[in-house]
Amino acid sequence: MKPNLWLAVTLTSLLIQGAAFCELTHDEKNLEDCWNLIDRGQFKSALTVLKETSNTSEAQAEKQMMSGVVYGLIGDQKHSTACYKRAIKQSAALSGNQSARAKSTRAFTLAKLAYADFIYGYDKNPSRKFQEAETLFESAINDEPQSEEIAARYGNSLLLWGSYLDQTGAATAAQEKYDKAIELSRLNTKNSSRARATSAINAATAYRKKARLDYLSGRKNLSAKNFEQAMNALHNMSIAGDQNSSDRLAQAEAEVLLWRGRYPTNSDQSKNDYQSSIEKCDLLLARPLENRNYLCFDTKGQALDGIARIESQAKNFLTARQFYEKSVANYDLAISTAPERKQFIQSRKQSSSELKYLNKFIKYTSSLKPEY
């Protein structure tokens, strides 16, 4: 079953965004290392680290959840959903003396499974899973009200729920989930740089999703204000000594610029924002392979496609073709960096298939305009 591409791209960023840890045990350190590997696109290494993590009850549920994330990112939805279901079953077995962390793991996994099931058509109405996740998160927050990790996971789950509601036409309900995610992002205990980065990214993601809804409803001024709030959420978060978290914030900023390019107040701003997004991604992708933020490939490819569409609409077809070619080359590099993600990236490359139609159009109009 082929997933909805727009939804799958949304899931990619939200899958990676949702992790945070504090006061790390040995197992938790392994799991944080795993998230860092995922950020870098080192998916096979991430799976190896997971296998080396112990099989204690709570760690096992966490391992299965994270394995589900990795398989989801490489496009293996069958193994991904199977891992999520095992994580839910294992975390449920801990009930009776369940820690706040175990509750949050179960809730986090339920939300991920709910959204993945929706994307791949396994469950057209995953509301029950989202509601169960919300109940568990509220209980976990009540147990540990100062846990930035739980708040970050809860916020990320609300973003998934809001995205589902958005895509099913429930815009008002989606706005409510985004607002709650923003509220949760304000808990800042400084326990974990990754948790703080995740909270800031959650807020920025919620604001840009609100901006999109405002734009589509004709409220362009409010949309622009929400995009500004998204940028502020990232700029106001300073993380020293954690390059990985700093890179995540920079990539999230490139993503906001990408979205602002899609939903602009004017066409000139659109092209400028796309270009700024590309430049930010290029800075991160210029790093050595082991230090790259892998999500930048997705963001950069979409921004290149965006400029190509603008040029095409302006009938600058040769320029448009150049940007589509850059987009295809970007996705080819993403595949060579993480071959296990080839199937997913191929579907992204197909979104640049307008290139072949541009080629035909350029040939057709070659006698009509000297430029050709």
Image: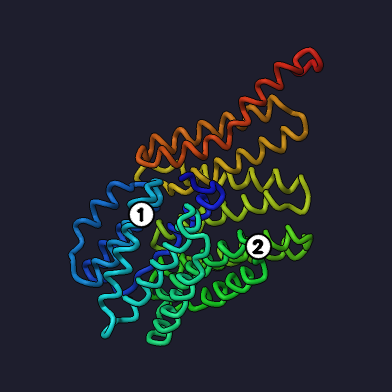
Q: Residue furthest top?
A: 367
The residue depicted at 58 percent of the width and 31 percent of the height is 353
Q: Mark 1–mark 2 contact, CB under 8 Å?
A: no
Q: At numbered mark 2, what does the secondary structure look like: helix, strand or loop? A: loop
Above or below, comparing residue 48 to residue 345 in the picture:
below
Which residue is tagged 2?
169
Position of residue 203 relative to residue 244, above or below, is: below
Q: Report the coloring of the rendering.
A: rainbow
Give, as a three-letter code, the residue at label 2.
Gly
Q: Position of residue 371 (x, y in %)?
A: 76, 18
Q: Is residue 164 visible?
A: yes
327 left or right of 68? right
- Please report the residue visible at 18 percent of the width from the left and 64 percent of the height from the top: 54
- Residue 80's tag is 1
> What amino acid type is highlighted by mark number 1?
Ser
Residue 296 disc label: none
Q: Quadrant of the C terminus?
A: top right
Relative height, residue 117 to residue 356 (above, below): below
In-front residue for pair 322/288: 322
